[in-house]
């Protein structure tokens, strides 16, 4: 884990284009941090306590300023299982209030139990689900030192609680999992139609750099957002036709043309479930 400078005073660490496992310690997502004159603001907390501690150690090797805030872009395990390390270090946790329903659900507990087995010992009996100290209802501006962080809700899209963090002085955007680079996105239960609209909104930001939730930093926003947009649009077109024509999913999936996307890392792992969930979504949408 080596922080990469993306703007003056701002770094990120890049996770691996893999599924979470014991072998990779669940280091599959990105996290960022910005050093201000009065503290450090962290964006996402990575997927285990051990990873969060490594990130905190890296921050401390760069600055003596304390971590004052952690902003959670969304409550997927690879982005928030490290929160308790930063909470213990005195940071204030900020997240969108729509995440509360998930965090206190049986699904969240079942996912944690599964992760304790699949990603042991990095996710273990000491790993717990951490609430935000401040649940955000809408757009909010956070000022730390001389730095302004514009925290903007963009969901429901990838999740109900998607947040992005924009630093206008640096023209730097932390996009969370609204943006995947150099790999197939995980769609899961996402509303892909709203996700496409969120991608269009991201392209309108005045940016020099965008840190995605997965993959390398982007300096060409429109071009790098387009692949995810095209993939989601293709899913919706193919599965939408099948759902509205009442073509069985298996038949539709096997006959679909995936050639443009099948060389993307993670495609073989996520595409089928992405397609199936999109099929179910499109069954509910009007033609």
Image (tube, rainbow, N blue to C red):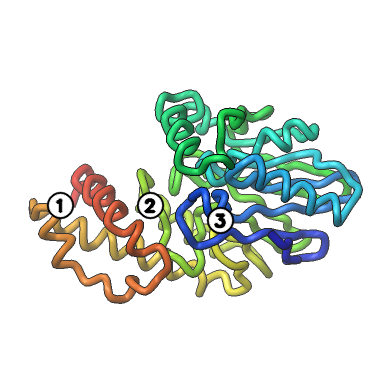
Q: Which class describes the residues within 10 Å of circle 2: few (<14), some (14-19), or many (20+)? A: many
Q: Position of residue 11 (x, y in %)?
A: 74, 60
Q: Where is residue 204 in the image (x, y as percent from the top left)?
A: 56, 63
Q: Where is residue 225 in the image (x, y as percent from the top left)?
A: 49, 67
Q: Which residue is under mark 3?
A: 213
Q: Nearest to the eye among marks 1 and 3: give it.
A: 3
Q: Which residue is under mark 2?
A: 187
Identify which residue, 176 or 109, lies in the foreground: 109
Task: Report the quarter where the N terminus lies.
Answer: bottom right
Under circle 2, the secondary element is loop
Q: Is residue 76 above or below residue 34?
A: above
User: Nearer the N terminus, badge 1 or badge 3?
Assistant: 3
Alpha carbon separation for disc pair 1 and 3: 30 Å
Q: Which residue is under mark 1?
A: 243
At horizontal 63% and vertical 73% (from top left) the residue drawn is 219
Q: Position of 52 compared to 244: left or right? A: right
Under circle 1, the secondary element is helix
């Amino acid at each position: 884990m080596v922080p990469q400078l993306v703007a003056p005073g701002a770094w990120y660490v890049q996770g691996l284009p893999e599924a979470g496992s014991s072998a990779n310690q669940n280091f599959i997502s990105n996290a960022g941090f910005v050093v201000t004159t009065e503290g450090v603001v962290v964006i996402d907390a990575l997927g285990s306590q051990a990873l969060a501690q490594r990130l905190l150690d890296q921050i401390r090797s760069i600055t003596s300023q304390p971590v004052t805030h952690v902003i959670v872009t969304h409550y997927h395990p690879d982005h928030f299982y490290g929160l308790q390390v930063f909470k213990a270090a005195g940071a204030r946790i900020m997240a969108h209030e729509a995440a509360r329903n998930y965090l206190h659900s049986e699904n969240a507990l079942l996912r944690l139990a599964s992760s304790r087995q699949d990603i042991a010992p990095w996710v273990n009996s000491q790993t717990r689900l951490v609430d935000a100290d401040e649940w955000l209802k809408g757009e909010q501006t956070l000022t730390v030192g001389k730095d302004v962080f514009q925290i903007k809700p963009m969901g429901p899209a990838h999740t109900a609680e998607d947040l992005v963090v924009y630093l206008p002085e640096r023209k730097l955007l932390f996009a969370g999992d609204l943006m995947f680079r150099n790999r197939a996105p995980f769609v899961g239960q996402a509303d892909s139609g709203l996700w496409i609209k969120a991608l269009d909104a991201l392209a309108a930001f005045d940016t020099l750099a965008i840190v995605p939730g997965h993959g390398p930093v982007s300096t060409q926003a429109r071009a790098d957002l387009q692949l995810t947009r095209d993939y989601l649009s293709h899913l919706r077109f193919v599965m939408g036709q099948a759902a509205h024509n009442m073509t069985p999913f298996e038949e539709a999936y096997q006959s679909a043309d995936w050639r443009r996307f099948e060389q993307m890392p993670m495609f073989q792992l996520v595409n089928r479930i992405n397609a199936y969930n999109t099929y179910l979504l499109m069954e509910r949408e009007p033609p």
